[in-house]
Image (cartoon, grey):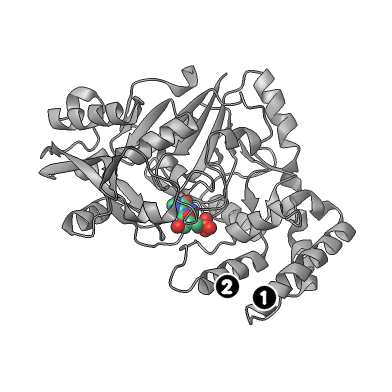
């Protein structure tokens, strides 16, 4: 099967944008299958920077088809804003190169109001969400009161559905001592944008089935990372969707065999944005160094990312749970110049050694990392395009990571530039 799913193996921000762009030049269609505009994928092409949140990365390339699948939550205003911004950079976005699943759920302004209200209600223990309304929109979807793209075609049904949905939300907002939101206002606002959105709406599962039969190369573009997966991540400090590769099938309308190769994007160290456990976090000068050198600020919210040593236990867990076949290792060059490097190879919990991250929130906060120390390198690895350009200590570090996580490095990225990539195996070859 000529299809590849790209998923994050840590807490997101692993550098998926560049890898997805690199792979999309070989694909026919790029599909987003979960998340929403909480994601931020930065692409640098010929020195020009594109920042995408909701649009699939294939959009910036000519002759590629982009799909937003049913597993994505779509904020129509954010989408139109992003389409405009990308058009202003000279990129064509039309129904000829973009389709949105008609059964995708909408994010409405009330969802971001609720997202913010719920974060406030959590007091000193917020999740640190992006406040884009992602969680409340998925809640509505699962509670069967969500508004979907196809509802925009039927104004009467749309009005009734919004009324039902707002009965629920206004009761909640009142309970939180907040102003209620008018159902009529939401309806009018949606009616204003529906003519701009509906031309993109389509039956994605049929289009993908046809493409698959024609042998087209499909690239599934995951957002966030496995440790933010609502089932397998550091719950409740997670986002509200599944990053698991199986979601590529569910979130686009294909069978479980839709994905041929699962590529896990993995940073050569660890970062996390927002709250929640982070066993290898460094609150010292090394952490600061990684943050500054790695430009670790969120693409979506601009927040400073927390930084720490590479956690092989977590990545091995992601590899196992999600069936990752190989990894794309990114940002190795950020480690250039460090005298020694640490890799977490296990944890200690209440005096006992364990080799996985337990599900309990209390345990996740308590685990103490067990480290192996490796020699660093002083040479630059930035822009290296073959293994022989890398210092011996860097090669040793990469090889040790492969051993510890149980998956090979398929691709090594050595700078944000597209061509600064060492390829060991073409993921589209299966
Ligand atoms: P939400 O997705 O806005 O509900 O945020 C839930 C958690 O996921 C927060 O800790 C966010 O910082 C994190 N998060 C959401 N999207 C991303 C992303 O694209 N990269 C990294 N972290 C993210």
> Are circles 2 and 1 on residues that touch, CB within 8 Å?
yes
How many residues crowd mark 2 within 10 Å: few (<14), some (14–19), many (20+)? some
Please name whichever residue, 315 or 86, is drawn nearer the observer in this view of the structure: 315
Please name whichever residue, 119 or 338, is drawn nearer the observer in this view of the structure: 119
Please name whichever residue, 400 or 204, is drawn nearer the observer in this view of the structure: 400
Instruction: Name the image quarter holding residue 382.
Output: top left
Question: Does residue 75 appear anywhere in the picture?
Answer: no
Please name whichever residue, 387 or 14, is drawn nearer the observer in this view of the structure: 14
User: On screen, 339 above or below 253?
Assistant: below
Instruction: Name the image quarter holding residue 88.
Output: bottom right
Name of the residue lying farthest toward the right:
156
Q: Who's the residue at 55% across and 20% down the image? A: 2
Residue 225 position within the rendered picture, expressed as x and y whole percent measured from the top left: 45, 44
Q: Which mark is residue 243?
A: none
Q: Which residue is mark 1?
A: 173
Q: Is mark 2 within 8 Å of ligand 1?
A: no
Q: Secondary structure at mark 1?
A: helix
Q: Who's the residue at 46% across and 56% down the image? A: 237
Q: Which residue is mark 2?
A: 117
């Amino acid at each position: 099967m000529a299809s590849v799913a790209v998923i994050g193996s840590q807490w997101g921000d692993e550098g998926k944008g560049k890898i997805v762009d690199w792979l999309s030049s070989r694909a026919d269609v790029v599909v987003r299958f979960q998340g929403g505009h909480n994601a931020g994928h930065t692409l640098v092409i010929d020195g020009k920077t594109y920042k995408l949140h909701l649009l699939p990365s294939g959009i910036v390339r000519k002759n590629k088809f982009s799909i937003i699948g049913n597993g994505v939550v779509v904020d129509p205003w954010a989408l139109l804003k992003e389409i405009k911004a990308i058009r202003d950079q000279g990129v064509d976005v039309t129904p000829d190169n973009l389709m949105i699943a008609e059964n995708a759920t909408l994010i409405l302004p009330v969802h971001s109001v609720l997202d913010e209200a719920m974060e406030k209600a959590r007091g000193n223990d917020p999740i640190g969400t992006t406040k884009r309304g992602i969680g409340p929109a998925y809640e509505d979807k699962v509670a069967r009161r969500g508004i979907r793209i196809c509802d925009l075609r039927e104004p009467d049904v749309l009005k009734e559905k919004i009324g039902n949905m707002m009965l629920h939300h206004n009761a909640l907002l009142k309970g939180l001592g907040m102003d209620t939101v008018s159902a009529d206002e939401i309806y009018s606002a949606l009616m204003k944008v529906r003519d701009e959105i509906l031309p993109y709406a389509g039956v994605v599962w049929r289009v993908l089935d046809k493409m698959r039969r024609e042998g087209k190369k499909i690239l599934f573009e995951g957002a966030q990372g496995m440790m933010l997966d609502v089932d397998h991540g550091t719950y409740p400090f997670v986002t509200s969707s599944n990053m698991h590769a199986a979601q590529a099938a569910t979130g686009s309308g294909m069978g479980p065999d839709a994905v041929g190769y699962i590529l896990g994007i993995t940073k050569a160290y660890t970062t996390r944005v927002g709250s929640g456990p982070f066993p290898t976090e460094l609150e010292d000068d090394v952490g600061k160094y990684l943050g500054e050198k790695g430009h670790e600020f969120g693409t979506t919210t601009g927040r400073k990312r927390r930084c720490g040593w590479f956690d092989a236990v977590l990545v091995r867990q992601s590899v196992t749970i999600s069936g990752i076949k190989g990894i794309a290792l990114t940002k190795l060059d950020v480690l250039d110049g460090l005298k020694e490097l640490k890799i977490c190879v296990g944890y200690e919990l209440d005096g006992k050694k364990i080799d996985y991250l337990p599900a309990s929130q209390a345990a996740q906060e308590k685990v103490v990392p067990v480290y192996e120390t490796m020699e660093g390198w002083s040479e630059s690895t930035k822009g290296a395009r073959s293994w022989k350009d890398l210092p011996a200590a860097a090669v040793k570090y990469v090889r040790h990571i492969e051993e510890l996580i149980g998956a090979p490095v398929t691709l090594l990225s050595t700078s944000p530039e597209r061509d600064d990539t060492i390829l060991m195996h073409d993921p589209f070859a299966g």
